[in-house]
Amino acid sequence: MLYFFIVSTFIAACAARLSSNLGPVVDLGYAAYAGNTTSPTGVDNGPVAFYGSIRYAQPPLGNLRFRAPAPLNETTSASQVLDARDWGPACVQRPATVGIGSEDCLTLNVWKPTNASAGEALPVAVYIHGGGFYFGTPQGFPMYDWVAQHPGGIVAVSITYRLNLLGFIGGPAVAADGDLNTGLLDQRAGLEWVQRHISQFGGDPANVTIYGESAGGASVVMQIAAYGGTKPVPFKRATAQSIGFGPTNTDAQTDAFFGASFYGSNLVALFYANGAASAAQFVGCPASGSEAMPCMRNASLGAIVSAINRIPNGAFAPVIEGPDGFLPDLPSRLITAGKLANVEFVGGHCTGDGKTFAGGQPDDFQTDDDIRRIVFSRWPGVSNATIDKALAIYPEPGAPGSPFATEWDRASTMAGEIIFTCMDLFLAEKLTSNGVENIFSYSWNAPDTVIFNATPYRGAAHTSDLYYLFDGEGHRTIANAGNTFTPFNTSEAVLSHEAIAYWTSFAATGNPSTDKESISPTWESFVGPNSSRRRLVLTRGSNAATNSTMESITDAKIQRCQFWMSPDVVAETRV
């Protein structure tokens, strides 16, 4: 009788631990979390449960600053239910402000159908936000609609990872007493947490798809090519949108931004010519030697914030580590060599990506010299000989066979194809040649209304796809995270539903058309009839249907992309 009483008491205590008046509880064994339930506006497939601010690694503070994410202790039993009803803190941004963003930011967020139970094995979609590797937060990319809209149910996750100096500081001192590319290692740790625990939310760890745009799209590529393809990846599929990064700093440049006085690039030379100092100097630490990293770890967050704000954009981003590192070479070289994971893939870009990054406005481009001076200011390592070749394969307006109506069209196409609108094609080709099925390509030709109204010459500008995929929330900023969005008009809502259906269908089955909207066209495979290359063009239409349609990718586009991704040119663009 006494034994029965003790066992009953223990069971009752466990049952009590698994419930909370805060909201629905998910017990992971080592920790239990209470989320909240909401019904997204305009979505009728039922409520969604949200769990935010879930730690996937130890706080990267003190001795863990500038080191790979340290694993949690997952051997203990949960003794209380933790409140997970809100977002975790953003990582420290750039521009940086003490009190906005936190070093203690290694958390993730989970959305699931409220009625999904442990072991249900639903598909999992994981989003990695962009922001140039120096700003951004999952708060701008809510995934309620993805979960609520998918007819069969999916589980969604977004990961917060270290940025700028705290996530991507490099150089020999860091390599000797720390870890390189800790922001990418954070992403991988989050994905590994998903493998261990997503089943408790109803997700299937064997059916995970990762997504990202811009620097997030670059992160997707880097996760695919991590370790040169020598290690298994914790995902099955990947979607890379408007892949954006580069030029990747050389070792000497990276060392210069940490502490050495090296003047071997335009960016670094200009930096020092204006009287700037290195990160270590700004923080007040030695520029090299065994005391450099202990000093950097003991520095106040205020000193770190000051250094972040005084170092130029591009100084702290993913670096090449060498043969044994997470990123052993430039991603384009790893792809060329076949040193990557053979995952199912969707790749695409916005038609205005190049217009966003051309470096000027339409009237600024009248001659070849304007293109040399403006477009290639972003790519200082590109030689005059390579620019000459580029100008030749992008015929000037009026030349026989030229597809460009104006110098602006010519310049913006070139600016986009250097990476944003060619690397997706390059990766799709390689995976296809490796025998991977379920490869799809797209072009996004629907403008973000907010950006378009401000700068109509950009067309479907960079991030326009995010406007539709995340209910316009991509315009959110850290300092004003609660700002509101004017609801979509009807034709915008139609495209939003169509796109989310394609994106989540790919996560569920590897085919974006399996669960597409009935009014939407079938998204055909990348390789079409007679080995043509095909892509879906997503475009707004009427209040009843979009104007999205399939098209063939032109031979001229393919040839231009082959030029930009060739070994000699990549040696200069460093993508």
Image: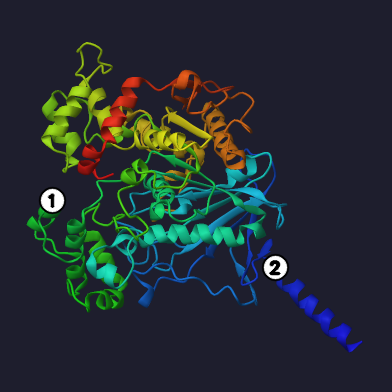
Query: In this figure, which colouring scheme has been used for the structure?
Result: rainbow
Q: Secondary structure at mark 2?
A: loop
Q: Secondary structure at mark 1?
A: loop
Residue 490's x, y, as percent?
Answer: 55, 28
Residue shown at the point (66%, 60%) measured from the top left: 200
Q: Give the class, few, some or many, for how many residues have Cα within 10 Å of label 1's Cα (few <14, many ≥20).
A: some
Judged left or right of residue 68, residue 574 is left
1 or 2: tag closer to the N-terminus = 2
Residue shown at the point (39%, 67%) measured from the top left: 68
**What residue is disc 1 on?**
265
- Where 78 falls versus 258 (above or below)? below
Q: Quadrant of the N terminus?
A: bottom right
Rendering quarter of residue 553: top left
Judged left or right of residue 137, residue 388 is left
Q: Give the class, few, some or many, for how many residues have Cα within 10 Å of label 2's Cα (few <14, many ≥20).
A: some
Q: Amino acid at mark 1?
A: Ser
**What residue is disc 2 on?**
20
Rendering quarter of residue 493: top right
The label nearer to you, 1 versus 2, is: 1
Residue 353's x, y, as percent?
Answer: 33, 34
Residue shown at the point (21%, 54%) measured from the top left: 250
Rendering quarter of residue 335: top left
Q: Amino acid at mark 2?
A: Ser
Judged left or right of residue 457, residue 441 is right
- Residue situated furthest right in the rendering: 1
- Residue situated furthest bottom in the rendering: 2
Cα distance in 3D space between marks 1 and 2: 57 Å
Mark 1 touching mark 2, by CB under 8 A?
no
Does residue 538 show up? no
